[in-house]
Image: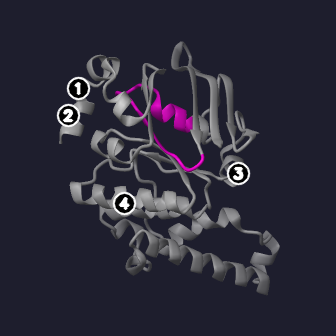
Amino acid sequence: MTLLELDRVNKSFGGLLAVCGVTFKVHAGQIKALIGPNGAGKTTIFNLLSGIESVSSGSITFDGLEITRKPPHVIASLGLARTFQTVRLFGKMTVLQNVMVGRHCRSKSEVLATGLLLPSALREEREIGEKSMELLRFVGLGHRASDRAHDLPYGQQRLLELARSMATEPKLLLLDEPAAGLNDAETEVLSDLIYRIREQGITILLVEHDMGLVMDISDEVMVLDHGEKIAEGPPDVVSNDERVIEAYLGGGLKSAQAG
């Protein structure tokens, strides 16, 4: 089943065409990677999908609904969540509170009920805390729940950002360079975690420069260059596409596979 579909999507910034006629699908249950050299348009596509940027032309459909020009909070409520290249946490809040912030988009309590501390609001807040703790344990951070987010080492901050995005109950999770800044051991933990997230019924679309990780975990890979799609298919097919190897990645895919 198609969960996400982009149809001839264009995005221009002034005279610069950052995304040019891009069409692709993500099927429910997939781990799909979006790769390409710096400036290829990968993060711009993520910004379009999450509503941070507006599409110039073309359409985006998510779970049967067109979301082309919907605002970020509406898109998130429909079940599309993301992480960012640079970790974005509330550093002075606790690890648990950071996850609870993500969970509140599913809150049913009205502002008045929350302000008056009505039993229904208190019960929901308790449930949010319990679910957030479950997610912290899922990513291996249950023991750091009461610590300040800015006290976590970088690798654990990445895991916290994942937990917070999962708190929104996404159907599709966009991971923007999740392995950036991680060492080999941390990348291995991340790889296992991505598989376990998929086992929770969450579809994953990731942008990533670590070709070893991409080739190991992806069901499908799509390659962008200068805003255009130049290749798409299973990892072994894309890794042998001469346009990708020679013209755009300089052999990076084969080198990663050999490693």
The image shows residue 115, relative to residue 226, as above or below, that is below
Question: Split into 4 quadrants, where in the image is the N terminus?
Answer: top right
Left or right of 160, for residue 23: right
Residue 118 image position (x, y, % from top left): 79, 84
Q: Residues within 10 Å of mark 3 (few under 14, many from 20)?
A: some
Q: Secondary structure at mark 1?
A: loop
**Contact, CB < 8 Å: mark 1 with mark 4?**
no
For numbered disc 4, what is the local secondary structure?
Answer: helix
Answer left or right for 65 relative to 28.
right
| Marks 1,2: beta carbons within 8 A | yes
Q: Which residue is mark 1?
A: 251
Give the labeled residue for mark 4: 192
Identify the image quadrant of the C terminus. Answer: top left
| Circle 1 or circle 3, nearest the eye | 1
Label 1, label 3: how far apart the Cα atoms are = 39 Å
The reply to whether the magenta stretch includes residue 44 is yes
Mark 4 or 2 closer to N-term?
A: 4
Q: Position of residue 191 (x, y in %)?
A: 35, 55
Q: Residue drawn 34% across and 33% down? A: 236
Q: Please, what is the three-letter code of the amino acid marked with disc 1?
A: Gly
- The residue stretch that appears in magenta: 28-47
Q: CA distance from mark 2 to mark 3?
A: 39 Å
